[in-house]
C-alpha cells in the first residue's frame, strides 16, 4: 500500500514529503544575543522572526504542517512549541540528550520510517538563512523527488564565493546522473575536511568544489540501507531505535539513544556513502556563522551601514548594527559590528568577529553571568 | 568691623573666603549621557560622584560649607540641593532665568557683598576636573589671599599642552607682580579670542600663552569697582541688583536680572580690565570638553583602555569605555569612544568626538526623544 495516497493534502502526491528541522545545537558566535539558553536558531537576527520560524515558513505550503518535524532536546523543544505552534506536538521529536546530528537523524528518520518507509525527508538546519526562497523551494521539491525516484541520498552543495576554511567541501566535478524538474543531480566524487587557506583557494579556483550546506534529503528506507552498508554500528542503533519507537518504550529509547556514538551525520554516514548525489544550492544560502555574515542580508543605508534596529550615523560607513531596543549612534567609524542587547554591548571589527568565540571563552572565566 | 573675625570656623582667618560654584549651563558634548535636563555638571563621569559634587569636595575644608554658594536657574537648583545637601539652602542662589555668566556673577557677588564688601569669592565652574587636588587647594588659597591683599581680579591660566582652538588664551609673558604663600602672580598682558590652529601653535611654542580656565577670584568690592570702571552698563545692573537684594524684593530682582545683557563674564568684564593678575593653574586641570578628554583621567588597563564601568576586551586598545550598567565587550578595535546608557549607545572614533555636537543637532530633527 502506498501511504502517500492516503494523504490527499500533500501538495505533491507522487511521494510522501516530510521536513525535519534540526533544531538542537548551541552556539556562542552571536554573543551577546546568543546565550546558553538561547542559541542562534531561536534568535530574531534578520527579521522579526526567529531563524527557526523563518526555516518553518520557508517550507510552508511546500509540505503540510503535519509533515514538518523538529528534533531537539526537551528544553529546546519547549521553546520550539512556543515559536512554532503550527507544528503537531507529536512531531516535536524530543531527544533524551544532545548527542550530535547522527543520533538526531536516526531518531527522526526512524519516526517517519514507521509511518512510511518510502517517505522522503528533507533535513534542514534550523539556523540557516536563504535569501531566494522561491528558488530554494523549487530546488528542494526537485531534490525530494530525486531522493524518492533515484533512491539516493541527496545533498545541496553551495557554490563557494570565498575561500572559506570553516566548511567541509564536496568535490563534484560535474558528472550528471539525472535531471528532475529541470534540476540536475551530480555524482559526488569525494568529501573534503575543512581545508587550510591555500587548499580552499585551490578549491575555489577549480570550480569543482562546493560547500557542504548540511541540507540533506533521503528516503527513510534508503537512509536505513545506507547505515547498514556504510555505518554498521549506527545501523544496529537504528534497529534498536525503530524497535523502541514501535513498542513506544520511551525508557528503553532513552537508554538506546544515549548509546549512539555522538557523531555528526556527515562524519558518521554521508562522507562514507559511495553514491551520494549533489544539487547546486544556488539560492542565496548562508549558515550565518558570525555577526559579520549578517551584513549582506540586512537593509543598508546610503553609507553602506546594514542595520537591524534603531540607528543614527554621522561619518559612519560599512558597519553592521544590531540594536533592536536602544538607539545606537555611530560617529566617524568604519567596518564595525555593533550589537546592543539588554545587558551587554559588543563592538567588534568586522574582520575580527571570529574572535567572539574566544571572547566567550574569556567570559566563562571572568563573567559567567553573561553566558 | 572685620567680618571674618566673627567666623571662627573659617580655616584662614585673615580674610573672608567664599566659593561660588557656577552650576548653570547646558551641554550636549557628553551625549548620550548628557541630556537637556541633565547637563554635564550633574553627571557621574569620572568617579561615582557628579562633577558638581567633586567640585564641592575639592574646596571642602578649605572654606566652611556655609561659605560655599551655587548659582543656577530654579530647575537646576533643585538638583543641586539634592546633590549637595551640605550647602545652605540660602546659599543656593537662584537665577530668574539663564542669562550667561556675567549675570550669574553679578547676582552671586552682590549677595556676598551685602554680607561683607571685602569678602573674597573664588568662582569655580561646576563641571571641570582637577587631578592634583592638593596642589589646586594650595594655589586657590594663595590666590584668594592675593585677591584680598592686592585688590585685583585673579585668574588661573592653564599652561597649554596642545594647540587647542577651543579656548580663549591669556597672554602672560611672565611679568611678576607679587608672590604670596610661595605662589607667583603675573601681569596679564592681553586676552586672546579662540585662535585658529596656526595661531594656537604659535601660542603653544612661545610659552607666553595660557588657556583661560574660567576660574576667577575677586573681592566683592573690587569686582564692583571693576564693573564701574570697565563695564558701566553692568555696573548700573549691579547697583540695581544690590538694591533689590537689600530690600529682599525678589520680584523686582527678577525684572532687573532679565535686563542684564546676556554676556559671559570674560567678554563683559575680565577681558576689559587693565590690571588683572594670573596664576599658573598647573594642577591637572581639564574642562572635560568632550568624551575623549576623559581618556587621561580614567584608570587604564594593560591595553591602554580607559574604563568606567563593566568591560571586557580582546585585541582592543586605546579605547575609552563608559558603561556603568551593561557589559561592554570590545573585540579587535582601537581608538574608540564607547558610551552605553539606559536607552542609547554611542560608538565614536576618539579623534572625531567633536562631531557629537553635530550628531545631537541631527537628533533634534530625527529623534528628539533622545535629547
Image (cartoon, coloured by chain):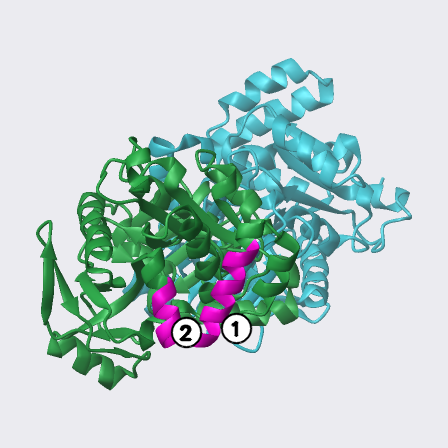
Chain colours: A cyan, B green
Where does the image place residue B311, in percent across and percent down from the top left? 37, 43
| Picture disc at residue B261 | 1
SS for dot 1? loop
Q: Which chain is mark 2 on?
A: B
Position of A67 compared to B347: left or right? right
Q: Quadrant of the N terminus of chain A?
A: top right
Quarter occupied by residue A353: bottom left
**As drawn, A217 above or below A110:** below
| Picture disc at residue B268 | 2
Q: Which residues are magenta?
A: B224-244
Q: How many marks?
A: 2
Do we see residue A44 in this rendering? Answer: yes
SS for dot 2? helix
Q: CA distance from mark 1 to mark 2?
A: 9 Å
Q: Main secondary structure of the magenta part?
A: helix
Position of B131 compared to B333: left or right? left
Between A136 and B43, the residue placed more toward the observer is: B43
Amino acid at each position: 500500500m502506498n501511504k502517500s495516497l492516503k494523504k490527499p493534502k500533500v501538495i505533491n502526491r507522487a511521494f510522501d514529503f516530510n521536513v525535519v528541522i534540526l533544531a538542537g545545537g548551541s552556539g556562542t558566535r552571536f554573543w551577546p544575543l546568543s546565550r546558553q539558553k538561547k542559541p542562534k536558531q531561536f534568535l530574531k537576527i534578520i527579521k522579526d522572526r526567529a531563524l527557526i520560524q523563518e526555516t518553518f515558513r520557508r517550507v510552508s505550503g511546500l509540505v503540510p504542517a503535519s509533515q514538518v518535524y523538529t528534533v531537539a532536546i526537551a528544553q529546546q523543544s519547549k521553546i520550539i512549541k512556543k515559536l512554532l505552534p503550527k507544528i503537531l506536538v507529536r512531531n516535536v521529536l524530543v531527544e533524551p540528550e544532545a548527542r550530535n546530528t547522527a543520533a538526531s537523524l536516526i531518531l527522526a528518520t526512524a519516526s517517519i520510517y514507521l509511518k512510511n518507509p518510502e517517505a522522503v525527508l528533507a533535513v534542514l538546519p534550523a539556523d540557516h538563512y536563504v535569501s531566494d526562497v522561491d528558488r530554494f523551494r523549487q530546488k528542494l521539491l526537485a531534490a525530494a523527488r530525486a531522493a524518492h525516484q533515484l533512491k539516493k541520498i541527496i545533498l545541496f552543495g553551495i557554490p563557494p564565493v570565498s575561500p572559506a576554511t570553516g566548511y567541509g567541501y564536496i568535490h563534484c566535478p560535474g558528472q550528471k546522473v539525472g535531471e528532475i524538474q529541470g534540476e540536475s543531480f551530480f555524482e559526488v566524487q569525494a568529501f573534503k575536511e575543512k581545508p587550510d587557506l591555500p587548499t580552499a583557494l585551490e578549491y575555489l579556483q577549480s570550480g569543482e568544489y562546493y560547500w557542504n550546506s548540511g541540507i540533506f534529503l533521503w528516503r527513510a528506507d534508503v537512509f536505513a540501507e545506507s547505515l547498514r552498508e556504510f555505518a554498521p554500528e549506527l545501523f544496529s542503533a537504528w534497529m534498536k531505535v525503530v524497535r523502541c519507537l514501535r513498542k513506544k518504550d520511551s525508557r528503553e529509547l532513552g537508554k538506546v539513544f544515549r548509546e549512539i556514538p555522538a557523531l555528526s551525520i556527515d562524519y558518521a554516514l554521508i562522507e562514507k556513502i559511495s553514491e551520494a548525489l549533489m544539487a547546486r544550492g544556488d539560492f542565496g544560502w548562508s549558515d550565518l556563522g558570525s555577526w559579520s555574515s549578517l551584513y549582506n542580508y540586512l537593509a543598508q543605508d546610503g553609507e553602506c551601514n546594514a542595520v537591524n534596529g534603531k540607528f543614527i550615523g554621522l561619518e559612519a560607513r560599512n558597519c553592521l548594527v544590531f540594536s533592536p531596543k536602544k538607539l545606537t549612534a555611530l560617529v566617524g567609524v568604519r567596518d564595525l559590528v555593533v550589537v546592543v542587547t539588554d545587558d551587554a554591548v559588543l563592538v567588534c571589527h568586522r574582520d575580527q568577529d571570529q574572535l567572539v568565540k574566544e571572547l566567550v571563552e574569556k567570559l566563562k572565566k571572568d563573567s559567567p553571568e553573561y553566558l
